[in-house]
């Protein structure tokens, strides 16, 4: 068992390793100074891909080995260069930098490398979009995504590289300190094994007119959702509709400005539009934001006056903007909490892959729950209109209801997840007699959990009641 007396860290060392440990500390909220991470030597000047274990791909700088420009290359495994001394882990890379590179998609940087011709084609598509029908748009989008299966990274259909890196560092730290269990703040309230959130992006007038019937359907399965409303040009937004959604326990988030695909064309244009978007956020009382088509540039999010964003996919092989954040957990981008999109969108499933089943959703849910993660869905009222697509969505709702009956899953609105994750980010586990307790604000639903080593791997166990061991 981990004891406070086993901590090997002085004040100056804590200052030195603080940033190295930040991302791992944020994930687990372990007792102070449990993670003692140091760099083996100076980092390289160049970025690239390498491995940390046989199956985990990293991107960034490192102290040893070679870094490759593409993830498909034969990659150097940096785990061989980890050193253990006096309970410290000497690492060949900065884990916080590597994790940030994944979550902020710095390995992809697709918007900044888009050619002038590609920008022209994208603008042309959105300019002519209103003149095309669904069949024509599907063919264009299928052509754009034709080579998606050749993308080896992030890993389809769910990438958990961030979780894998953190678990490996936790395992190594426990072995370095000679402890077999470590307390931490469990990821979700009341000991839930994972979190489920449903969102509905409303893209057209027809979709807006179906919002009430979609709320009826969700309610019949015991699920409340957040509706992404486009404030300009697409359709009229009435205050009565927004009030109806909230009165029924649903929520409203701002979806882009006008859904023309040009929000991130340039920083100047983004800043201009962000002021208008922020105004609509205040007018609608919306705490959350999502960009149209999941276009994004997380480096600019400080201009948004929202508590949370929902624009970054876990894996983006089939999206117009490639990349992916490689995590199934919420994370902060400055003061904005990112709630990643961790499952395939209904439109992509129906019209790009041409599937009419929930099989892929089931696979993704199983892998997300395997990491106790966030299952976040985007289902459009615009695309579950026909019998075949509506029945698939009903099948998904039925599957989720069965799953919730068998497993303790927290079903929450995005705003509720934001409130919990912010509170959890300020919690800490402290020694209390012979047990541990959680300190911080709003800890009534927080649970102490324990990381254990079983057969050489990390497993998690919840305390029988909050703070008791």
Image: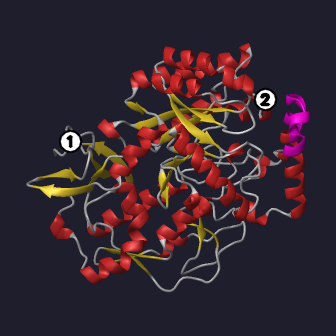
Instruction: Name the residue rendered at 33%, 72% in the picture.
Output: 36
Instruction: Name the residue rendered at 67%, 25% in the picture.
Output: 208
Majority SS type along the magenta span: helix
Residue 460: within the magenta? no
Residue 454 visible in the displayed image: no
Residue 127: within the magenta? yes
Q: On the picture, is 161 further left or further right than 469?
A: right
Q: Position of residue 360 (x, y in %)?
A: 64, 32
Residue range (magenta): 126-140
Q: Position of residue 18 (x, y in %)?
A: 36, 73
| Applied colour scheme | secondary structure
* Numbered label attached to residue 354: 2
Residue 441 visible in the displayed image: yes
Distance CA(mark 1)–CA(mark 2): 46 Å
Q: Position of residue 257 (x, y in %)?
A: 68, 45
Nearest the eye: 180 or 434: 434
Q: Report which residue position mark 1 lands on.
A: 466
What secondary structure is marked by label 2?
Answer: loop
The image quadrant where one finds the N terminus is bottom left
Nearest the eye: 429 or 78: 429
Circle 2 Cα neighbour tier, 10 Å, few/some/many (<14 / 14–19 / ≥20): few
Instruction: Name the residue rendered at 69%, 62% in the picture.
Output: 108
Q: Position of residue 391 (x, y in %)?
A: 66, 16
Q: On the picture, is 422 further left or further right than 55?
A: left
């Amino acid at each position: 068992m981990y004891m406070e007396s086993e901590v090997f860290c002085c004040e100056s060392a804590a200052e030195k390793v603080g940033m190295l440990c930040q991302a791992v500390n944020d994930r687990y909220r372990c007792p102070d100074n449990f993670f003692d991470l140091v760099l083996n030597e100076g980092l390289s000047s160049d970025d690239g891909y390498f491995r940390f274990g046989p199956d985990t791909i990293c991107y960034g700088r490192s102290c040893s080995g070679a870094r490759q420009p593409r993830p498909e290359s034969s990659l150097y495994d940096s785990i061989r260069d980890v050193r253990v001394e006096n309970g410290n882990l000497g690492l060949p890379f900065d884990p916080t930098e590597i994790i940030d590179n994944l979550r902020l998609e710095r390995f992809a940087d697709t918007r900044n490398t888009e050619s002038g011709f590609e920008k022209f084609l994208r603008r042309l598509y959105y300019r002519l979009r209103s003149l095309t029908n669904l069949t024509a748009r599907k063919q264009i989008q299928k052509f754009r995504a034709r080579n998606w299966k050749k993308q080896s990274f992030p890993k389809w259909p769910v990438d958990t590289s961030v979780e894998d890196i953190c678990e490996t560092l936790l395992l190594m730290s426990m072995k370095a300190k000679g402890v077999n269990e470590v307390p931490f703040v469990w990821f979700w309230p009341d000991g839930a094994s994972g979190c489920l959130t449903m969102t509905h992006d409303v893209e057209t007038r027809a979709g807006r007119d179906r919002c009430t019937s979609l709320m009826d359907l969700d309610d019949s399965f015991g699920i409340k959702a957040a509706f992404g409303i486009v404030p300009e040009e697409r359709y009229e937004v009435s205050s009565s509709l927004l009030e109806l959604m909230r009165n029924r326990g649903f929520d409203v988030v701002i979806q882009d400005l006008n859904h023309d695909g040009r929000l991130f064309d340039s920083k100047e244009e983004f800043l201009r539009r962000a002021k208008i978007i922020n105004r609509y956020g205040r007018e609608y009382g919306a705490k959350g934001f999502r960009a149209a088509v999941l276009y994004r540039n997380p480096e600019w999010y400080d201009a948004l006056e929202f508590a949370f964003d929902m624009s970054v996919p876990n894996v983006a092989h089939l999206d117009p903007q490639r990349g992916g954040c490689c995590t199934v957990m919420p994370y902060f981008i400055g003061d904005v909490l990112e709630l990643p999109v961790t499952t395939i969108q209904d439109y992509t499933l129906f019209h790009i892959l041409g599937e009419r089943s929930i099989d892929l959703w089931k696979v993704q849910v199983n892998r997300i729950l395997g990491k106790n993660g966030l299952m976040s869905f985007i289902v459009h009222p615009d695309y579950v209109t026909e019998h075949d697509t509506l029945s698939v969505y009903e099948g998904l709702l039925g599957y989720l209801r069965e799953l919730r009956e068998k497993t303790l899953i927290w079903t929450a609105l995005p705003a509720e997840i934001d409130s919990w994750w912010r509170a959890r980010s300020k919690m800490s586990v402290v020694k209390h007699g012979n047990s541990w307790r959680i300190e911080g604000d709003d800890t009534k639903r927080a649970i102490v959990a324990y990381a254990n080593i079983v057969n050489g791997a990390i497993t998690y166990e919840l305390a029988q009641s909050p703070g008791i061991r």
